[in-house]
Image (tube, coloured by chain):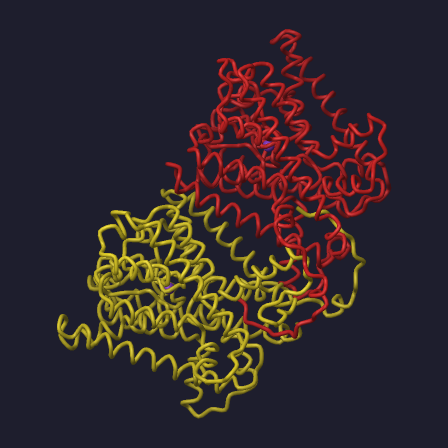
Chain colours: A red, B yellow
Amino acid sequence: MNALGKIMSPSRVLVLGFALLILFGAILLTLPQATQDGLGLSILNAAFTATSAVCVTGLVVVDTATTFTLFGQWVILFLIQVGGLGFMTFATLFAMILGKKITLKERLLLQEALNQVSVEGIVRLTKSVLLISFAFEAMGTLILTIHWYSDFGFSKALYYGFFHSISAFNNAGFDIMGNFTSLTAFVGDPVVNMTIMILFICGGLGFIVMADLLAHRKKFRLHTKIVLLVSGVLILLGTVIVLIMEFANPDTLGPLPLGTKVMAALFQSATTRTAGFNTINIAGMYDTTLLSMIVLMFIGASPGGTGGGIKTTTFIAIALSVLSTYRSDPQVVFKGRTLPRDVIQKAWAVTTSALFLVFIILSILSHTENSDLMTVFFEVTSAFGTVGLSLGITPTLSEVGKMAIILTMFIGRLGPLTLAFVLSQKKNKQAAHIKYPDERIMIG
Amino acid sequence: MNALGKIMSPSRVLVLGFALLILFGAILLTLPQATQDGLGLSILNAAFTATSAVCVTGLVVVDTATTFTLFGQWVILFLIQVGGLGFMTFATLFAMILGKKITLKERLLLQEALNQVSVEGIVRLTKSVLLISFAFEAMGTLILTIHWYSDFGFSKALYYGFFHSISAFNNAGFDIMGNFTSLTAFVGDPVVNMTIMILFICGGLGFIVMADLLAHRKKFRLHTKIVLLVSGVLILLGTVIVLIMEFANPDTLGPLPLGTKVMAALFQSATTRTAGFNTINIAGMYDTTLLSMIVLMFIGASPGGTGGGIKTTTFIAIALSVLSTYRSDPQVVFKGRTLPRDVIQKAWAVTTSALFLVFIILSILSHTENSDLMTVFFEVTSAFGTVGLSLGITPTLSEVGKMAIILTMFIGRLGPLTLAFVLSQKKNKQAAHIKYPDERIMIG
Ligand SMILES: [K+]
Ligand SMILES: [K+]
């Protein structure tokens, strides 16, 4: 727990950094050069779009393709890239380019930004992060450019490939296909489906996992094993649910041929790992499917990556903890390893804070918006998980609604615990040594 | 954790006892003598009504006043009384009446039934439970009979006073006012409001708390302090929310004079401590109010009483645990006492199991019922918390929907942990001594 005291200050720097980046982006988007009508966005819409981009959410109040100029779209791309890779990763990049020595304080910041336990090797890790990211994005751009070349011509294919590769790898969910259609035009296109999916799934696994996988060691970390297992199970489970529930739905999978049905089910399941793209109309789905998607979005991606949510590791930690309680087992064991008590505690705190946040924002929006509970619940969970899927109310949100969603995306991206640590007072060191007597209460 | 092994078998007996009582009640309600049309209830409706009565929920598929004969209503009253005071409390009563010696095994059963930590004094406690209950119910009957005498005449006033006192003290929520109106006719009647509220609030505090209060000790147990504080705060908070949100709503508080507004807000808040009566039309409330009521119903009453939900103590245990994580404090402290680690673990397990149950049943009903998410969510939470409030879909539930709600009431009444203990295999004693090495994972 000592480490926590040390990183308190880095948490504050991170929160401030993200806030300043959003402010900077919002100002740029209000410029006349940013929008095709030459008026610039309103302050609230600019703040919403900048937050959505920096927090790699992808909820949009205006259509990205038809509203923004090329300049506006590049601003959004820049915000996505900086937001996705993390403010601090970028700061280090600049520091390295300028040949500066990385101080211990900066290393601590990086540690917090990448959610790491130790400071050792943090600079090397940051370099790997950047290298891996750019390699994935370059590969995605290449494939999509070649694929779209015959239809779009070279320059449009390159730009579209570039934009959607960056958006996909960073789990941003922004698209420039026009009229809020996301990737629905490509529901039956295996190249687009596979390229985009590989990009956002890998981006969402987290850099630690990717580094562990690329290191070709004989034995993976427990963290890597858990992330791969849980991500795989969640994607598979989601695919089965979407496929079964929506199989005959005329508004979603119904009209598609069998192979496309399976691919679309897989894509719509995987996108809840907080990518935010969709290839079928989400609003056409049945309530039961939407409920499952809400849970999958709430769980989200893996820590240390470009995705949001409470994270796959948090989910498995609480699930294992509950199962150990059922079995009256004092240890929480997974694959021959015990998860330390404070890890479990942190998992509970993250989950409860997230549930509390979603409930509060849901209460606000159910008052301010003229929508049914499902539509609002889906929107709020999507914002918290920085997913970006929507049943369609984002552009027509009230002013209070937009502000509430901005706040939700911000907290969702930084993690509710980061904010709680920033806001809560540091514990009195002396008080920590007082041991109070136990007393039992009845539970449940 | 040793105690858990010993009570495993009592858990099974409790589950079986409740199931048999429901079966017995359901059979009686299918008899021609039970209903005014002389046909008896259908098997499914009889099972639903019996489960609702035994689990003191109060959700009804048929109107209690107009469907049942006096015999049918007495069957329901009997099921409420036995279900509310608990199968085992009653078994002890019979044993005592018959002059039998209470065996250790029976004491263990009682301990489980009353959610007690120790076996000592369990028979004395059971006697107090019965004494306190009958005293409250007699007092309620007396007051309501006197109050209704001039309007209803003696015998009807006595029967109505008796029925609603038993239903209120046991947090059953069944009424015989007719046409599913609950107590809406008495929204401005302070005597009915106060009598019914005192009965269900006291019944919901739990017998341990009442015994502690009646013992006139200088220092109350930690359990008592927590229950009183949390119950008070929840009722106050709910009152403020209902009053503010519904103040001008023409379908709820709008048309009422100020004093009645306050009383109705108080009643509708307190009823979520799982009583299930209502004095205003719940279906007329705004979404934001309903969301708050869903959370309050989910939290529910206090353990060892006649109410349901995850329980007030479970709620405060997880809240304190999260706050201690925010402060990086390894202990969970309340009023100078540390809550033991296994108590916190149990609280998390109860809450997570409950959330999981509500989600699964919600998914099923969102598929089988033609209702919006809010209506179904409210119904499922009401069933889990054994509350009995409804937005009105209970009578029109599909067959699968009715079966799902029956299961939810049953698990809600027994507590998700009791069922988990019954279903899960006993831990291998030897395996408990293997200590696995720690390994950290990233969270959140
Ligand atoms: K996203
Ligand atoms: K009830």
Ligand 2 quadrant assignment: bottom left
Q: Quadrant of residue A310?
A: top right
Q: Relative to B63, is A420 above or below?
A: above
Asked whether residue A266 appears in the rendered view, the answer is no
Look at 85% across and 43% down and name the residue there: A120
Look at 36% across and 74% down and name the residue there: B81
Give coordinates of residue B223: x percent, y percent: 53, 73
Q: Relative to A209, is A24 above or below?
A: above
Give A8 or B185, whichever is nearer the viewer: A8
Q: Residue furthest bottom?
A: B99
Asked whether, in this view, residue B142 is left or right of residue A364, the answer is: left
Give coordinates of residue B236: x percent, y percent: 40, 61
Look at 56% across and 14% down and name the residue there: A33
Give coordinates of residue B201: x percent, y percent: 38, 70
Q: Relative to B439, is A94 above or below?
A: above
Asked whether, in this view, residue B353 is left or right of residue B172, the answer is: right
Give coordinates of residue B412: x percent, y percent: 46, 62
* Image quadrant in which the N terminus of chain A is located: bottom right
Look at 52% across and 82% down and name the residue there: B106
